[in-house]
Amino acid sequence: MKIFTHFLMGIMLLSSCKQSSTSSSVLDGIDIAVDTVMISTGDDIINLKWGIYQSGISHDKKYLFISGGTSPYLERINLETLAYEEKMIFDVEGPNGFGDYVYAVSSDVNNNLILTSHYSTSIFNFDKQKLKKHLLIGRNFEGEQFTSKIIHSKDYKTTFGLVQNHDTGEIFFAIVNEETDVLRKVKLNGFEKAEDFTVRHQQGRGASISPQNTEIVQLGNKLVITNPVFSKIAVYDLVEQNLKYYPCLPTLTASEKTGTYIKDVNSREEFTIRKIEIGKEVTFLPLMTEATTDKYVRISTIGLPKINEKGLLEMDDHRVFVSILNDSYEVIKETEVPDGIGKLFSNFIPQKPFLKDGKIWLYLNINDELAFVRLDLGLRQ
């Protein structure tokens, strides 16, 4: 992973804990203040092998939890004090067993932890006690598996998620009644387009796959479903219990990827090239919001590859755009972020931005220490 010690816009990254550097730039009517903060770890070491990609934020936005993956622990970082607090060691097996491979962490409206493994999802409280285990196999709807993290209702009687038909590429919004074990699903119109931008490389009995994953997040009383290929979103209202679509049309970029690409390639080199070519077109990240605002925030990127010293194509930089949407999911403000921020989206490990205190937090590795670049959009003004 590349280590960035400065940005082109002149933002210095300070190495002393809890300190930050700040600058601002007025672009298209949005005053963006940028600062960089480091997490104080003392004598502890945070495992940054996968950055914060296998992490999640507590519902109250106070903590970041980084999963140990195949190791039974979560690393807890306090985002208010900017300090590493604890390595939460879980049981390997038994009633409070961690799971075989926890690749995703999230938090529900009860502020409990949701740990997603290959074949099950478990709900834990902060005392590492397992409150519920949700199995994805061996149920009445055998053959269906969620392709997203799952979201529970407050009383845990209903589960929401996404199901995909891998033969057709069709994606469905799914609702499971946990008391009757009945699955209902509805096709997400147009979301099958994402399959046109998936790349595969068969390697013996295994394969490398670069998909365009549809994601579902809970934002207030809405479940918002997005895909990187297009700006359109699907929104399920938990109160009105209906599903609607919104175009969320940007003004500074295209509203979707439009290229034609070969899905199945014959070499690892071709696999990498195809991924980069697809990344040159606009990519949309999931929407973000928080309780203190009625606005939604979205990041989109356009890749800027180059030929490296070995004569190979590599993703070197990105143009980064921030959109602010109103509660009708209309883009009301949009700007391109200052130069230098795009480097943060150009690593092997994908960014996983989150919104806290009106700021977008972006992961940064400084000499194997955890830091964040924060973009303040002035949402609380």
Image (spheres, helix red, strand yellow):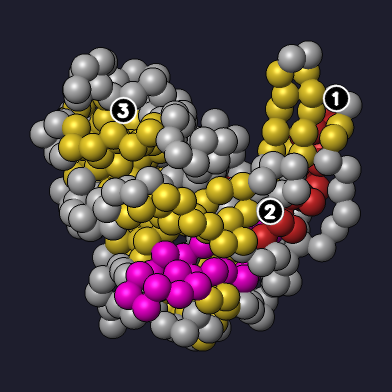
- How far is the residue under mark 3 from the one under mark 1? 35 Å
Q: Nearer the viewer, mark 2 or mark 3?
A: 2
Q: Residue at x 36, y 66 (%)?
A: 219
Q: Are marks 1 and 2 in contact (CB under 8 Å)?
A: no
- Image spot of residue 376 (x, y percent): 37, 68
Instruction: Give whichever of discs 3 and 1 has the lower sequence position.
Output: 3
Q: Which mark is residue 170?
A: 2
Question: What residue lies at 69% left-to-right and 42% top-to-bottom?
Answer: 166
- Tag of residue 46: 3
Residue at the left extreme, as displayed:
127
**193 shown above or below 207:** below
Q: Residue at x 23, y 58 (%)?
A: 154
Dot 3 crowding, Cα within 10 Å, few <14, some 14–19, many 20+: some
Residue type beneath disc 3: Ile
- Residue matched to label 1: 267
Quarter that holds the C terminus = bottom left
- The alpha-carbon separation of the residues under discs 2 and 3 comes to 39 Å
Labels 3 and 1 touching (C-beta < 8 A): no
The part of the chain drawn in magenta is 222-243
Distance of label 1 from label 2 (alpha carbons): 27 Å
Residue 284 showing in the rendered view: no
Amino acid bearing label 1? Ser
**Which amino acid does the dot numbered 2 rest on?**
Glu
Q: Position of residue 1 (x, y in %)?
A: 54, 31
SS type, badge 2:
loop
Mark 1 vs 2, N-terminal side: 2
Indicate yes or no whether the magenta region holds residue 281.
no
Q: How many marks?
A: 3
- Prevailing secondary structure of the magenta residues: strand
Does residue 254 appear anywhere in the picture? Answer: yes
Q: Give the secondary structure at mark 3.
A: loop
Q: Earlier in the sequence, mark 2 or mark 3?
A: 3
